[in-house]
């Protein structure tokens, strides 16, 4: 029987090892370091193959593949979004991802990405806010207190200096969960009874709801001058969170317009409505926040390069910490032409 070669083994980061890695490195440090990897990759934007995610929609949710490559490494993420899952005791979003060498096509990492997606989404939000939020912002409203909310709070505390978070959800149990989870975080956490109360005094407003519908989480009269809106929840056709008039008053920043115009808040606008790509801001080609009264809006939908960055980060950290296990998942006969013989000898 053939003994698998080293190349046949693929490092696998399980949910258990991902959690161990986060605790080993530190939650906020992980998000800060992922943000640095994302920023580095956005600054070399032209190096990447870019395509909108490949989505398979049904009446209960969506299953998506998110691929990209920088010419040396290839990565993809499998991810779903099924809002009704929560009522069945299941996650709304689950994911896994793979990183491979372009030169050989051999995978070099397989990883869970349910936790990693939450980490990179929060890291991306806070990274964008570093360029777009008003200077000295210390208060953030978080409307929608589901699985993503605590990650957002920690990321904004670490990367942007947020000190107070004001929480609202239509389900009081979700807010109570978030309040409990944020105990000991160093943040002042305020539970609010209405979205209007949540945004009181907030310089940053984060919306991250789950229902796949055209909702109005924020109405136009709720948004005053000078705020930064971190719109996380709109991430597929037919799902939005903001009143259209808010978009018309805002300077809008996106990851990849070809995807955001289909999935983001700007699906409510004409296809030629001006937006600014974040990589241009990070590279200094375009301006981010330019005035105290300006309303900035990060129309976040999540893009494959961010997942590539997160996988690149985990690949490095897994090797440093040893928090992975090898999977025998690549058939590797002694003679590459003799796959059938390898199978028969295994008998």
Image: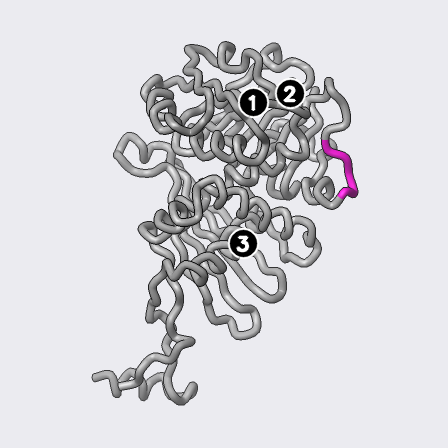
Residues 203 and 221: in front is 203
Tag 3 residue: 308
CA distance separating discs 3 and 1: 27 Å
Determine contact: label 2, label 1, CB under 8 Å: yes
Image-based side of 260 in relation to 321, left or right: right
CA distance separating discs 2 and 1: 7 Å
Residues 142 and 185: in front is 185
Label 2 or label 1, whichever comes before in sequence order: 1
Q: Residues within 10 Å of mark 1 (few under 14, many from 20)?
A: many
Q: Is 210 placed above or below 188 here?
A: below
Residue name at image x 64 percent, y 57 percent: 48
Determine contact: label 3, label 1, CB under 8 Å: no
Is 287 contained in the magenta span? yes
Q: Residue furthest left?
A: 347
Label 2 or label 3, whichever comes before in sequence order: 2
Magenta range: 284-288
Tag 2 residue: 227
Q: Is 223 placed above or below 55 here?
A: above
Residues 339 and 269: in front is 339
Label 3 or label 1, whichever comes before in sequence order: 1
Residue name at image x 69 percent, y 44 percent: 279
Q: Which mark is residue 266?
A: none
Residue name at image x 61 percent, y 20 percent: 203
Residue name at image x 57 percent, y 44 percent: 35
Q: Which mark is residue 205?
A: 1
SS state under label 3: helix
């Amino acid at each position: 029987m053939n003994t698998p070669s080293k190349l046949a083994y693929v490092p696998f980061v399980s949910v258990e090892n991902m959690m161990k890695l986060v605790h080993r490195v530190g939650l906020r440090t992980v998000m800060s370091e992922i943000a640095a990897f994302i920023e580095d990759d956005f600054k070399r934007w032209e190096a990447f193959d870019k395509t909108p995610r490949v989505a398979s929609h049904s009446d209960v949710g969506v299953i998506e593949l998110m691929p990209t490559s920088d010419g040396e490494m290839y990565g993809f993420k499998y991810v779903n979004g099924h809002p009704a899952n929560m009522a069945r005791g299941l996650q709304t979003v689950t994911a896994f991802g793979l990183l491979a060498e372009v030169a050989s096509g051999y995978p070099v990492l397989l990883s869970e990405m349910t936790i990693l997606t939450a980490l990179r989404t929060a890291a991306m939000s806070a990274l964008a806010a570093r360029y777009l939020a008003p200077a000295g912002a210390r208060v953030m409203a978080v409307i929608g207190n589901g699985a993503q909310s605590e990650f957002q709070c920690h990321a904004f505390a670490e990367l942007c200096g947020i000190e107070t978070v004001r929480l609202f959800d239509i389900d009081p149990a979700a807010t109570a969960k978030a309040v409990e989870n944020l105990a000991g975080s160093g943040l002042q956490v305020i539970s609010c009874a209405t979205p209007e109360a949540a945004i009181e005094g907030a310089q940053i407003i984060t919306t991250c709801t789950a229902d796949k519908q055209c909702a109005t989480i924020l109405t136009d009269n709720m948004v005053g001058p000078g705020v930064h809106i971190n719109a996380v929840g709109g991430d597929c056709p037919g799902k939005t969170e903001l009143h259209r008039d808010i978009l018309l008053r805002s300077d809008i920043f996106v990851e990849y317009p070809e995807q955001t115009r289909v999935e983001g808040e700007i699906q409510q606008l004409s296809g030629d409505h001006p937006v600014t790509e974040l990589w241009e801001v990070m590279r200094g080609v375009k301006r981010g926040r330019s005035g105290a009264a300006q309303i900035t809006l990060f129309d976040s939908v999540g893009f494959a390069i961010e997942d590539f960055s997160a996988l690149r980060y985990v690949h490095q950290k897994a090797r440093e910490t040893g928090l992975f296990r090898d999977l025998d998942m690549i058939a590797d006969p002694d003679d590459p032409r003799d796959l059938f013989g390898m199978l028969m000898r295994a008998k």
